[in-house]
Amino acid sequence: MRIFFKNKLQLQYAYLQCHCAILRRWLFFSYCLALVLGSKPGLTQPIMQSPVSSQPVANLGFKQEFNSYIWTLTAGTRQEWKKWNVSFREGFRSSLLRLGNNNKWKDDQDASLDIMYALLPKLDLFSHTRSVVFKDRQSGFNNDVQTHSNMMGLYWQPLAALQIQAAAGPKLDQRYEQRDAGWSFQLEGQTDRFDWQDYSHTLKMMLSGDQLGSRQNKDVQFNYQVYKSFSPGTSDSLHVYTLQRRRDNYSSIFGEIESFRENFNGLDNYLSYRVNSNTNFQFITLLLNKDVRVLSYGQQSENRERHRTDLSVDNRMKLDFQWSGARWQNQLSYWSQNQQYDLQVANSGLPFSRRTAFITPDNKSNRLLFSSRLDLGLGQADSLHSYTSISRFQYDTPDTSNFDDRDELRINSTLHYFYKLSPFLKLELEMSVNLYHIVYIFGERSADNNWNRILRLRPSVKYTYKDRFKLSQSVEVLANYVDYDFEEFISSTKSFVFRKFALDDSITWVLSDRSTIHVDYRFQMEENGQLFWQDWSERLMLTRQSHWIKWYWRYRTKKGLSIAPGMTIYLRKAWRHQTDPSGIDRKTAFSEHKSYGPVFRVLYHPYDRARVVIDAIRQRVISNNLSEYYINTIHFNLQWAF
């Protein structure tokens, strides 16, 4: 049977109707199944399953931003009855990208259904069903995936601190026009913290995987932690873990497979010591050995392999002082990493994906960091908070054809000061200085050596009168200077400066219990120019001025309805600055942008289980000599606990 559509709007409408019909049937069937099995609280969940609220909840959303349209639907419920426990989840997202006469869709659905039956007081039978469907017509790549699986197993809790879970079942997987059928399995054991020989122990082991024809997925995990508390504030803990992960995916429609395999082996040690009632010391050691291997094989090409090993060590010392109204935290840390690559293919870009290209050469890097944080209460009305960090980063490679070896120095400092003049008036002052110096070791890149200096000052004031009137104002000045070390040896000036001045005002006036007026205004000035650091001068290149205005009036009714109509305005102008032969600066306008339009917000909360929010903005845009156009932004959200 053929169906003909008169226009594309009818086609889109039919497409959405089809989606909605499928969703309605799926949700109705799943919800009815859950209701049939009844409800009773308190049944233990399997280890791997996240708890779901016992109250059925649905969330429906729609968003339009310019030419992008997104529909979302999430729903979940858990129902319990006698020995039965049922959990259901549904997540659906459909997006439309309109490009002229070409509409591109992308759909993503993830649904799961968990059923548990209590066979014995400490033994449960459970079933986990999951369906994932992803269709992409936006990126232009073959990203479609369909995965459907069902696992049945047993959940056993012989002791209060010991849980064991085992499950297996069939799985169907389709991607890159390849269909695979196979089996999935999972075996997991976990102990909660238990005491033995005056130490607290925690152990977890897990083995899971998929066998899908020529493809395999596997996870092997082991975690062991031991903890000892010697006295209040003094303790030691050791965490040892290992993880093996394998993921096989198709890389072409011809059945080529890319196998990504990772092995992690790590050790974490946390030692805490209370020096006295006001001083605490902590020493942390983190060791990690990571082995990554990527294989590419198939019938159409020869086998290829790439290999990388990472060894990282992180040592931290923390000293924490506390006294009345103050806290001073200090940290000294040293981190190092060694990466080695074993490439068995000359072409570093193919046939591997970008994520596993491994084109970086062997390298060694380390970072030495000192940081200090001070929180000081100066009195009942004011307080001071400061943070300072100094770090040195070093990156070296043995590759003689690579000139990226460098040293980096970073200095960051921030100061916050709060002062309460009265119960109605508060002052705040924020200052920050960020310095960044990068030095390349080899002369081939020494022209990129530079200092980056960012200075920021932001005072603000807030006035509040009986929660009926609120006024806040802030002024911000920011300057960013980028100065290159050897600029006198190059033909053009690379150093530049960026400055910004911003003024923010916000007013909220509660006219009555139901009526409120809110106004936001922001003024901003920016300038870009060439920087001559030695002379402390600049040549102005570009200046901009911007205005943002937004206001709305919100009115609330007795029946849970709130409406807020308003207006938004944005204006921006930009000028170029050029110096004529006589040395006079010429300012020429070259860009002007305007956008304005109404805003509307609706909040409907008729009772505790239902909530509807609608935000809508329609803007008219006028920019230079371009034709006028409109931008519609709509956000819709419905939350319903049924």
Image (spheres, rainbow, N blue to C red):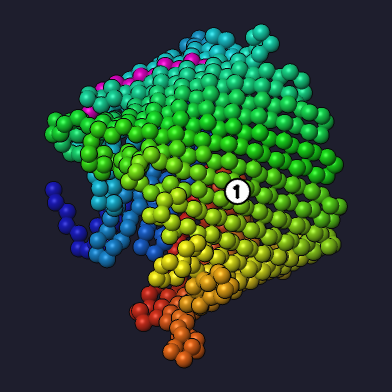
Q: Residue 78 or 49: which is nearer the viewer?
A: 49
Instruction: Give the amino acid type for the residue marked by disc 1 in the picture.
Output: Tyr
Q: Quadrant of residue 29?
A: top left
- Give the residue drawn at x 51%, y 78%: 540
Pointer 1: what residue? 607
- Give the residue drawn at x 22%, y 63%: 7
Image position of 205 with respect to 476: above or below: above
- Give the residue drawn at x 42%, y 16%: 187
Local SS, label 1: strand
Q: Is residue 615 left or right of residue 295?
A: right
Q: In which quarter of the image is residue 236?
A: top right
Image position of 106 with respect to 123: above or below: below
Q: Residue 587 or 254: which is nearer the viewer?
A: 587
Residue 441 in percent (x, y) is at 45, 50
Residue 343 in percent (x, y) is at 28, 34
- Give the residue drawn at x 63%, y 63%: 456
Asked whether 126 falls inside the magenta stretch, the response is no
Residue 461 in percent (x, y) is at 74, 65
Q: Residue 362 or 262: which is nearer the viewer?
A: 362
Q: Determine crowd level at label 1: few under 14, some 14-19, many 20+ residues with C-alpha closer than 10 A.
A: few
Residue 518 in percent (x, y) is at 64, 68
Q: Please indicate, yes or no, whether residue 127 appears anywhere in the rendered image.
A: no
Image position of 604 with respect to 353: above or below: below
> What are the residue bounds of the magenta stretch?
178-190
Q: Please indicate, yes or no, whether residue 195 appears anywhere in the rendered image.
A: yes
Q: Main secondary structure of the magenta part?
A: strand
Q: Is residue 116 left or right of residue 211?
A: right
